[in-house]
């Protein structure tokens, strides 16, 4: 009833209101891969206060605003993943770009900056990722911890991620959209 489809690359996981784990409360996770061996994604709405240039010199000029690292999840926080959105049209992105779904894909951070500049509609860099072992995500979906919904290209590199969770819920059909108006603390309602 609450989710649509099966977990796969390009789907969004929206934390259910009852998911209180501080790593995931009100998060929007873009799945980059999901199969029988598990799932991997990045949290789209957890900007940090760390400028990208502080960690990856020069990349601050290439990433979408705000030019900060995003906390992609609790796993592998000492590593970074770059997600980009290619322009519409026949171009498949710059060298080092690998499509995940639609116009969204991963960019190899070893790609020379001059080959990336101007080749993307947006780029975001994530420290860490969210990961699930075999069957774990499916179990969490079954217990109602997550809502599984389609992503839109614009979800990846928004200038402000404030309210992304509610906005994605609001655009869903049926009862799922109702959750977008739910107060943070239902006890206060």
Image (cartoon, rainbow, N blue to C red):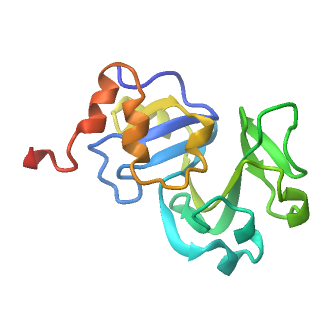
Query: Residue 69, how many percent across, how many down?
Result: 59, 67
State whether residue 36 is above or below residue 119: above
Picture coordinates of residue 149, whole percent (x, y):
48, 29
Please identify the residue farthest to the left as the structure is shown. 188
- Measured from the top left, where is residue 117 in percent x and y? 83, 59
Identity of the residue drawn at 36% across and 25% down: 2
Residue 184 located left or right of residue 168: left
Please tell me which residue lies in front, 103 or 61.
Answer: 61
In depth, the one of 159 and 7 nearer the eye is 159
Quarter of the image for residue 32 reads top right
Quadrant for residue 1, please give it. top left
In the image, farthest residue toward the bottom: 54
Query: In this image, 109 relative to 127: left or right?
Result: right
Q: Image quarter for residue 78?
A: bottom right
Q: Position of residue 188 (x, y in %)?
A: 9, 49
Compared with 117, 186 (above or below) is above
Q: Is residue 43 visible?
A: yes
Q: Is residue 97 left or right of residue 149?
A: right
Classify 79 as above or below 131: below
**Which residue is located at x 50 percent, y 63 percent?**
47
Numbered-mark total = 0
Q: Residue at x 38, y 29 (%)?
A: 142
In which quadrant is the C terminus drawn? top left
Residue 112 visible in the picture:
no
């Amino acid at each position: 009833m609450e989710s649509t489809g099966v977990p796969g690359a390009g789907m969004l996981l929206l934390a259910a209101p009852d998911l209180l784990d501080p790593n995931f409360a009100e998060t929007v996770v873009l799945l980059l891969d999901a199969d029988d061996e598990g799932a991997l994604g990045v949290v789209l709405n957890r900007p940090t206060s760390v400028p990208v240039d502080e960690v990856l010199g020069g990349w601050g000029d290439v990433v979408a605003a705000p030019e900060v690292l995003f906390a992609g999840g609790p796993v592998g926080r000492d590593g970074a993943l770059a997600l980009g959105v290619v322009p519409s049209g026949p171009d498949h992105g710059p060298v080092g770009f690998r499509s995940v779904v639609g116009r969204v894909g991963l960019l190899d951070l070893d790609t020379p900056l001059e080959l990336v500049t101007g080749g993307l509609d947006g780029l975001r860099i994530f420290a860490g990722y969210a990961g699930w072992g075999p069957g774990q995500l499916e179990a969490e979906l079954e217990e109602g911890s997550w809502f599984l919904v389609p992503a839109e290209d614009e979800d990846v590199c928004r200038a402000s991620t404030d309210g992304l969770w509610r906005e994605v819920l609001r655009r869903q059909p049926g009862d799922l959209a109702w959750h977008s108006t739910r107060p943070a603390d239902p006890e206060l309602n």
